[in-house]
Image (cartoon, helix red, strand yellow):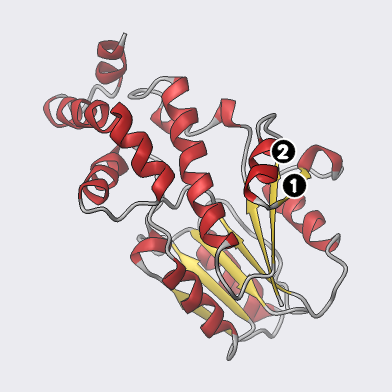
């Protein structure tokens, strides 16, 4: 059995690195749409038995209930920091034989095929690290029951997760795909997001959001960044 865990921060603090080019309402809408797409990808995968949405955001209980996921309020765990909260949430699952998969919520191109690759890799290894496209961060982490490495999300998390697994004597495998690797964090990612939308390679919620007007906004942002590369605030000021 495989349990999936999706951590989602308070959306009022979502995607702060995009604050120079997108308003808070747009950043919140984008973060929620991407998280909904990841959630649906996990919920509909035949190898995943349960999905837990872990979040302090006021909208998260409704999001979980409407999708069929479990909801866990991270404020109830008595831990702080992403790694502490995740570790405590995993400890509450109880079943030592249960395999786990942690996926970030900002992977708008994540597909069932990506999840299948992680599941298949887990059959012959203890830990699967789904790295970002730069090979520095961890966007997805899967591990067998009783084989949890020390969680090390944050700066240079790919190297730290691999080191933690090796120190624990665990067999570790890297998995990098376009769906797992592409995350939306910085203004430079918006051009890729728009290109994927035009190719029809995004999840339904993110695609609908772009279709409803965000795509036009992103085009303006991208043009502004290309003509004024040193002034990330220019696009936001033009938004009004």
Q: Which of 204 and 59 is in front in this view?
A: 204
The quarter of the rendered structure image containing the N terminus is: bottom right
Residue 185 percent location from the top left of the image: 41, 42
Q: Nearer the viewer, residue 145 or 20?
A: 145
- Of pointers 1 and 2, the one earlier in the residue sequence: 2
Q: Which numbered circle lies on residue 61?
A: 2
Residue at label 1?
71
Q: Which quadrant of the view contains residue 45?
A: bottom right
Question: Compared with residue 34, is residue 167 higher up or lower down, i.e. above or below?
Answer: below
How packed mark 2 is, by other alpha carbons closer than 10 Å (few <14, some 14-19, many 20 or more), is: some
Horizontally, residue 98 falls left or right of residue 78, namely: left
* Rendered residue at 70%/47% (across/down): 54
Q: Which quadrant of the view contains residue 43?
A: bottom right
How far, Cα to Cα, is label 1 from label 2?
Answer: 6 Å
Q: What element carries label 2?
A: helix
Question: Compared with residue 111, is residue 236 higher up or lower down, i.e. above or below?
Answer: above
* Rendered residue at 68%/36% (across/down): 62
Question: Compared with residue 113, is residue 25 higher up or lower down, i.e. above or below?
Answer: above
Question: Compared with residue 227, is residue 73 higher up or lower down, i.e. above or below?
Answer: below
Residue 116 percent location from the top left of the image: 49, 76
């Amino acid at each position: 059995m495989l349990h999936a865990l999706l951590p989602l921060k308070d959306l009022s603090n979502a995607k702060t690195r995009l604050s120079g080019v997108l308003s808070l309402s747009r950043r919140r809408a984008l973060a929620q749409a991407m998280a909904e797409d990841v959630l649906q990808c996990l919920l509909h995968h035949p190898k995943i038995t349960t999905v837990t949405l872990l979040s302090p955001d006021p909208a998260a209980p409704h999001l979980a209930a409407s999708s069929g996921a479990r909801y866990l309020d991270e404020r109830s765990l008595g831990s702080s920091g992403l790694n502490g909260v995740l570790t405590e949430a995993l400890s509450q699952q109880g079943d030592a034989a249960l395999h786990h998969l942690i996926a970030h919520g900002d992977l708008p191109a994540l597909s069932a095929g990506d999840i299948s690759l992680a599941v298949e890799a887990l059959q012959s290894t203890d830990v699967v690290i789904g790295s970002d496209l730069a090979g520095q961060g961890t966007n997805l982490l899967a591990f067998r029951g009783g084989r949890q490495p020390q969680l090390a999300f944050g700066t240079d998390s790919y190297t730290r997760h691999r080191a933690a697994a090796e120190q624990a004597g665990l067999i570790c495998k890297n998995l990098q795909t376009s769906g797992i690797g592409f995350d939306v964090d910085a203004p430079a990612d918006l051009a890729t997001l728009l290109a994927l939308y035009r190719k029809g390679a995004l999840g339904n919620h993110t695609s609908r959001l772009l279709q409803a007007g965000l795509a036009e906004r992103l085009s303006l942002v991208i043009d502004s960044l290309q003509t004024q590369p040193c002034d990330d605030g220019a696009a936001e000021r033009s938004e009004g």
